[in-house]
Amino acid sequence: MYRKLFWAGALALLSSAGAASESSGDSTIDEITVFGQDPVAGDRHPANPVSLLTPADLVSINAATTEDLVKYEPNLVIRRRYIGDPNGTMGIRGSNMFQTTRSMVFADGIPLHYFLQTQWNGAPRWSLVTADEIGLVEVVYGPFSAEYGGNAMGGVVNIETRIPAERRVRIEGSMFQQSFDHQGFDDSMAGGRGFVSYGDRFGAFSIYGAYSRLENDSQPMDYRFDSSAAPAGDETAVSGGLLATDEYGNPVVQYGNSGRQSSTTDQLKTKFGYEWGQWLALATVAYEERRIDALDSQNYLRDGSGSPVWNGSVAEDGIAFEVSSSDFSVSEQERRSLLLGGRVQGPLSDRWWLEASVSSFEILDDETRGSLANPDDPAYTPAGDVSVFDDTGWSTAGFKLSNDALFGSDRLSVDTGYGYERYRLGITNYRSDDYLAGERTAAVSASGGETELHAAFAQFGWQATARLDFQLGGRYETWRAEDGYYYDFRRDNLQDHDDRSESRFSPKFSAGFQPADQWQLRYSLARAYRFPIVEELYQNERRTTGTSIANADLEPEAGLHHNVTIERAFEGGYLRLNLFAETIEDAIFNQSAIVDNRTIRTFLPIDEVDTRGTEFVFNRSGIAERLDVRFNLAYVDSEITRNSANPELEGNTFPRMPRWRGHLLATWHMSDRWDIGGGMRYASNSYGDLSNRDTASEVFGAHDAYMQIGLRTNYRLDNGVRLSLGVDNLTNEVTFVHHPWPGRTLFMEAAVEL
């Protein structure tokens, strides 16, 4: 039903847009000043499809955190399990939400992507940029620009922030509350966010500072269950378990959940700007402190006297299953991170433009502490596990030179430059006699290593005629992995991995043709290589909850990418059709299995994955003078075409890749003061397993189809006050994307600008 309503609403809006396409609708947008060059589509990245977002496009989004701002963009998914989730991963095109090293995020040229780990641990550090300071967002699709390496196989999000033109103080407070009732958990969770920022200019100098604090409780992230069997007769009789299935449709008994998670995030951001002539310089300092407490595990099982049953062989209604004390363990995580960065831009001459940037990211402290049993369990002791990151972070530096009239010809252009990246990761696991105190009684294992990348690129443009242009580029990269180690303290066994180095060249080509003034056709072709990251190569862990085994012999992923764009521009917007195809060889995938009730994970390559897709995009502002619409629909077919390690997987759909994705974002400007709008996000169901056997829905581990509907209204008063109300997941749809997504969530927000 939701799918039919989605298409009906989308087609109705498109029909009204078509009827109004020839009328002139004036849409007033406040003038903004952003740091850096204006990234106009077809200008900075002519070989790539590009989508742009301005603050006027964002007014109907309930943006509790920064990643919310891009969740309606074409063929893009944000996997954020709850407000305050540190694992807000992003997937674009043929790169799924757990292939986090195939998408990049920059703020003012400073990387926010996290190329130390992948999957749920590889989310960009979104909170290091605030929604308040964003002036423009650019989403670049595919690796067709030589400026970016194989980490752009999916795409790139470039965020340009505003620099203060005058004194501006902003104070904002928001509250949100969600209700969640499913599979034994029924409760309401509340949260809130406070924010204050100050910006000012003193001649050529500008300063911006902001502080925010977010607190929120989530729905349960995990459910405890075990396969059902016939009782042997010596089990403890219990009640309270729920009959259910796992994601494969197998019958299981569900006997608990992980309970709510309490998330607290403090973020402090400072920017210093300086302008002289046409030159701009910006220095950024961003600090994040985050705490996640999972202390509320629920146990459904009761014995004949009504007391909880925490472990052992149990039976209910003639069904037997196993329960372990560790199923109800609790945990705490604390992390502190610091990002330093700077960028300088300006003209070296009438034709040459320079952009240079540096950044340094350090994990100051990142410690996770977990118990071996629940504090209410008679078997509980303060013993537990402690994991600590050591000497972890990255450094980057680079520059780009641009010339739009090479050799004095307005028909020739060039972008060329150099980039350097270095990543360090170290993690040590301890067994603790008092995990709450962070005591590290005995080291269990330690692993880590480093990677380094040098890259040089050049991309030439030739405007052959007024309607025909060509882009030709190349990127040469030298990658090195070194100092990889794994130490098993229990066996006193140290394993040092051999240092490795690889070099690759990635050619790029694009041709564009403009058959008429409002039409644009373009074909782009690119080779791209994505080198393994430290976690994939070196991070080995043996913990109570499972074992992770790295693979130091991984080869780079090799991608061949095609894109055809057909675009029709009109006043206030455009229609666009993208046809894309990509073939990835040696696709690195984290594969897991259950062995003796322990999860074993390791990174293995899949020989070849082919992805074919189509994207339809309609963006238009000023329909009937007051309506702004952004609509997109994507179809993607991603198939495992070769896999010598297990040929039975050939022909299967690649995990976490739904066939259909659609987004609709609309705003009706009731008046100069009042906006009403909202959005819909749709995705068909997908698989989480390479075998494609996980076909059950609305259970933990499933990858459901979903239709998420959000609404929002804003009203602005004369005194600089804005009041907003909103709701996400209006229909309170139960959706699992492995973990459950939030239920209906209500928003209240007030902001004042002085």
Image: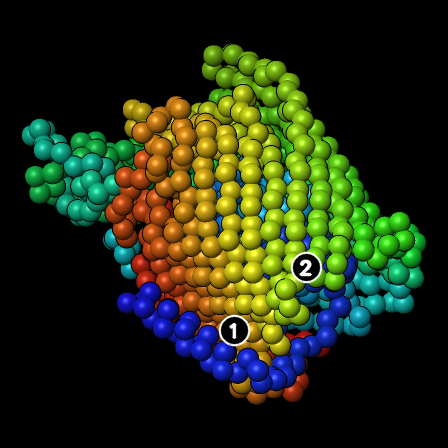
Q: Which label's residue is closer to the chain start, 2 or 1?
A: 2
Residue 471 visible to the viewer: yes
Amino acid type at image mark 1: Val
Identified at 35% across, 48% down, the residue is 686
Rate crowding at label 1 as few (under 14), some (14 to 19) or many (20 or more) other CA atoms within 10 Å: many
- In the image, residue 202 sits, relative to residue 114, either above or below, namely below
Q: Is residue 364 left or right of residue 180?
A: right
Which is nearer the eye, 607 or 197?
607
Residue 40 falls in image quadrant: bottom right
In the picture, which quadrant includes the C terminus?
Answer: bottom right
Amino acid type at image mark 2: Gly
In this rendering, the label closer to the viewer, 2 or 1: 2
Find residue 2 and name its label. none
Q: Which residue is mark 1?
A: 629
Q: How is the image coloured?
A: rainbow
In the picture, which quadrant includes the N terminus?
Answer: bottom left
Q: How many marks?
A: 2
Q: Which residue is mark 2?
A: 42
Residue 373: image location, x then y, percent: 34, 35
Residue 39: image location, x then y, percent: 71, 60
